[in-house]
Image (cartoon, rainbow, N blue to C red):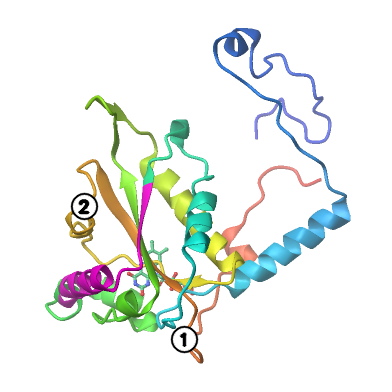
Amino acid sequence: MPKSVTTGTVSNTYENPYPSPDLEARFPFVSYQFQRRPKAEMLERAQAFHAQAEKRRSIRMFSSDPVPRELIELAVRSASTAPSGAHKQPWTFAATQDPEVKSILRVAAEKEEQANYLLNRMNAEWIEAVAPMGTDHHKEYLEVAPWVVVLFEHRYERRQDGSTRKNYYVKESVGMAAGLFVAALQNMGLVTLTHTPSPMAFLRPLLGRPENERPFAMFPIGYPLEGVKVPDLRRKSLDEIYVEVGQEE
Ligand SMILES: Cc1cc2nc3c(=O)[nH]c(=O)nc-3n(C[C@H](O)[C@H](O)[C@H](O)COP(=O)(O)O)c2cc1C
C-alpha cells in the first residue's frame, strides 16, 4: 500500500474528478444509479450468494429434457454484461439444440479426445491432474444435453467495411463472460460443464464462425440426469486463497 494512503481517513475529495469536463464534452456520460443497502442486508445477500455458488458443480450426465431458448438467451445476455477490455465485448456465443449439429460436435470432440486419452497426446502430469474427474474420450453429453453453447473469443475485431481493429485483454474478458454465464445458468436452475476438448480449433469451421474467432470453451446445458454423481472435491479454504496486505482496521 502506498505510504501516503491511511485507511479510514481518506476524504472523498478528488483532485482529478472523473469524467473531466473535457472528457464529458467529448464523450457521453450518464449518472450511475445506485442504492446503498443496509449492512445487514448486504451480509445476508453475500451469504446467500456464497451458499448458492458453493452448490454449483460441473455436470457430466444431463437429462435430455428440453430447455426453452429464452433461458439460454437470457444467460447469454447476462454473460455479455461482463466487463471487457476497452468494452470490446470480444465474444460470440454459438448455441445449438439441433440433434444433427450436436451429434457432429460429439463425434469431432471425441476424435480429438481419443488422441488425448488413447493415443498418448496427454503428458503424465495432465493425466494425473484430471484423474480425480475420471474424464475420458466419451462425450455423450454433447448429444444428450438439450443445448450446447460454444463460446468464441474474438482475437481481433472485424468491421463491416472489412477493416480490422485490435481487441484488448481478450482471454481475461472472455473468461469473465464465461464465469458470469455459468453463474447465470446456475441461478436459473440449470447445470452445465465447462468443456475444452483439446485442441478446439475444429469448432470454428464446424459452426461456421469467421476467421477472427477462436473457440474458448463449450458448454453442454440442461438439467442434471436424476441421481448423477460428481467428484467429491474439496475447495480451497479462505486461508489458502486470500491474503490481506497492510494494516488491519
Ligand atoms: C477452463 C476450464 C476447462 C475445463 N475443461 C474441462 C473438460 O474439458 N472436461 C471436463 O470434464 N471438465 C472440464 N472442466 C471442469 C473442471 O474439471 C471442474 O470445473 C473442476 O473439476 C471443479 O469442479 P466443479 O466445477 O464441479 O466445482 C473445465 C473447467 C474449466 C474452468
The span shown in magenta is 92-114
Q: Position of residue 33 (x, y in %)?
A: 74, 34
In which quadrant of this rendering is ligand 1 seen?
Answer: bottom left
Residue at image position (66%, 46%) is 245
The residue carrying mark 2 is 208
Q: Nearer the viewer, residue 69 or 20?
A: 69
Reply yes or no: does residue 108 show up in magenta: yes
Q: Which quadrant holds the N terminus?
A: top right
Disc sitting over residue 225 in the figure: 1
Res 123 seen here: no
Rendered view: 202 above or below 138: above
- Viewport quadrant of the C terminus: top right
Say which element carries label 2. loop
Classify 191 as above or below 84: below
**Which residue occupies 69% across, 42% down?**
246
Point out residue 122 in the picture as x, y percentages from the top left corner.
20, 72
- Secondary element under disc 1, as helix, strand or loop, is loop
Q: Quadrant of residue 14?
A: top right
- Is 247 displayed left or right of 153 in the figure? right
Locate residue 35 relative to residue 166 in the image: left or right. right
Q: Position of residue 53 (x, y in %)?
A: 61, 67
User: Local crowd at mark 2 within 10 Å, few (<14), some, or many (≥20)?
Assistant: few
Q: Is residue 66 left or right of residue 139?
A: right
Residue 227 in the image, given as x and y percentages of width and height: 51, 92
Front in this rendered view, residue 61 or 179? 61
Q: Amino acid at mark 2?
A: Gly
Specify the amino acid type for callout 1.
Answer: Leu
Q: Which mark is residue 58?
A: none
